[in-house]
Image (cartoon, rainbow, N blue to C red):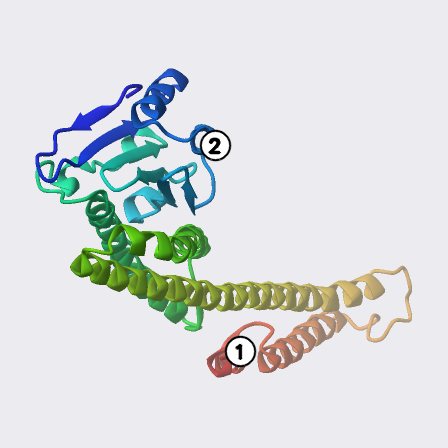
């Protein structure tokens, strides 16, 4: 929507506006309605930026990337959600693909928000809950991917690994940015909630949850780096085995080729060439030489076999 949607709030005179993907004219109208400081308006008008907190001209501005599960799997950048608020007014600004934007109206409760800080808390709580669910799903999938990578009997799915890596990266960036923004906002929020100890306590719990999720996301990122390294090592090992197998078959073909090349020369005194059954001896020599080579390659594991199976089973 290019214009603002105002929610009618009956409790304590709080006014809330919702603004999605505004045009320049729509945003300018919102800035005039809220009497927003020009510097803050210029900052928000610039479009997508990193998660951050600003305190300008009596307004607090808290921006975050809404990279929860359903949104993080979409192509393109994550939607950005920004709260602009003071003691009695709250603007919720969202930018991004229309289908990815969050419907915050039910979360705000329309006629039940006691303060702008409470409205911010409600939406943040919903987002953090989704981040928590996403973190649990990532941990479960990461365990499955680790099991596949370290199981020699399973050929790991590289597409799944890199999809998971992309998802963890997006969640990690979003929740880490939110953690830093909340850390910057702590003192300013304390001032606004000086008379609401209960809400401040809930914000404190939310902040600790965000910090825990950021730590978990960073840990998952590090764990997946180890998985990717193991996957690349597995790929290199399989490629080396393929090259050994190809080399072994080339050697098996080379033995009869060399012998046939020698006996194919136009000489009468090649043993046992004058004998009418000499060709049988030569063919048998080729077969015996190839069998000996094949058994040696099997023992080395170049053609698979029990030795290679034991070696794969011993690999960490």
Q: Is residue 227 left or right of residue 261?
A: left
Q: Is residue 286 above or below residue 116?
A: below
The numbered mark at residue 308 is: 1
**Residue at 26 percent of width and 49 percent of height:** 124
Q: Is residue 93 above or below residue 112?
A: above
Q: Is residue 28 above or below residue 213?
A: above
Structural distance between the alpha carbons of marks 1 and 2: 68 Å
Residue 66, visible in the rendered structure: yes
For this orientation, the residue located farthest to the top is 25
Kindly indicate the quadrant of the structure image that contains residue 152: bottom left
Q: How crowded is the residue under tag 2: few (<14 C-alpha within 10 Å), some, or many (20+)?
A: few
* Residue nearest the observer in this picture, 111 or 208: 111
**Residue at 27 percent of width and 54 percent of height:** 128
Q: Is residue 201 left or right of residue 300?
A: left
* Residue nearest the observer in this picture, 139 or 6: 6
Q: Is residue 215 left or right of residue 272?
A: left
Q: Position of residue 248 (x, y in %)?
A: 66, 69
Q: Position of residue 184 (x, y in %)?
A: 42, 54
**Residue at 24 percent of width and 47 percent of height:** 117
Residue under label 2, please give it. 39
- Counting residues from the start of the chain, the first of labels 1 and 2 encountered is 2
* Residue nearest the observer in this picture, 26 or 155: 26
């Amino acid at each position: 929507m290019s214009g603002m949607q105002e929610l009618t709030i009956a409790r304590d005179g709080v006014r809330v506006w919702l603004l999605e993907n505004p045009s320049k004219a729509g945003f300018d109208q919102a800035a005039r309605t809220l009497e927003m400081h020009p510097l803050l308006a210029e900052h928000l008008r610039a479009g997508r930026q990193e998660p951050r907190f600003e305190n300008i001209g009596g307004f607090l501005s808290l921006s975050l990337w809404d990279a929860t599960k359903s949104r993080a799997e979409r192509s393109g950048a994550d939607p950005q959600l920004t709260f602009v608020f003071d003691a009695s007014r709250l603007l919720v600004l969202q930018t991004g693909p229309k289908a990815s934007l969050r419907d915050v109206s039910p979360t705000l409760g329309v006629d039940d928000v006691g303060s702008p800080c409470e409205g911010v808390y409600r939406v943040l709580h919903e987002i953090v809950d989704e981040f928590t669910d996403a973190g649990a799903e990532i941990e479960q999938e990461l365990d499955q991917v680790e099991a596949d990578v370290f199981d020699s009997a399973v050929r790991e799915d590289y597409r799944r690994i890199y999809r998971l890596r992309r998802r963890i990266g997006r969640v990690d960036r979003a929740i880490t940015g939110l953690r830093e923004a909340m850390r910057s906002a702590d003192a300013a929020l304390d001032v606004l909630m000086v008379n609401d100890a209960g809400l401040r306590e809930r914000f404190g719990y939310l902040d600790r949850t965000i910090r825990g999720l950021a730590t978990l996301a960073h840990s998952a990122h590090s764990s997946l780096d180890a998985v990717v390294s193991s996957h690349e090592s597995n790929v290199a090992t399989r490629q080396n085995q393929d090259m050994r197998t190809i080399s072994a078959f080339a050697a098996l073909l080379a033995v009869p080729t060399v012998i046939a090349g020698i006996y194919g020369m136009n000489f009468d005194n090649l043993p046992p060439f004058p004998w009418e059954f000499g060709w049988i001896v030569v063919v048998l020599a080729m077969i015996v030489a190839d069998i000996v080579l094949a058994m040696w390659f099997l023992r080395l594991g170049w053609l698979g076999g029990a030795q290679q199976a034991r070696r794969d089973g011993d690999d960490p």
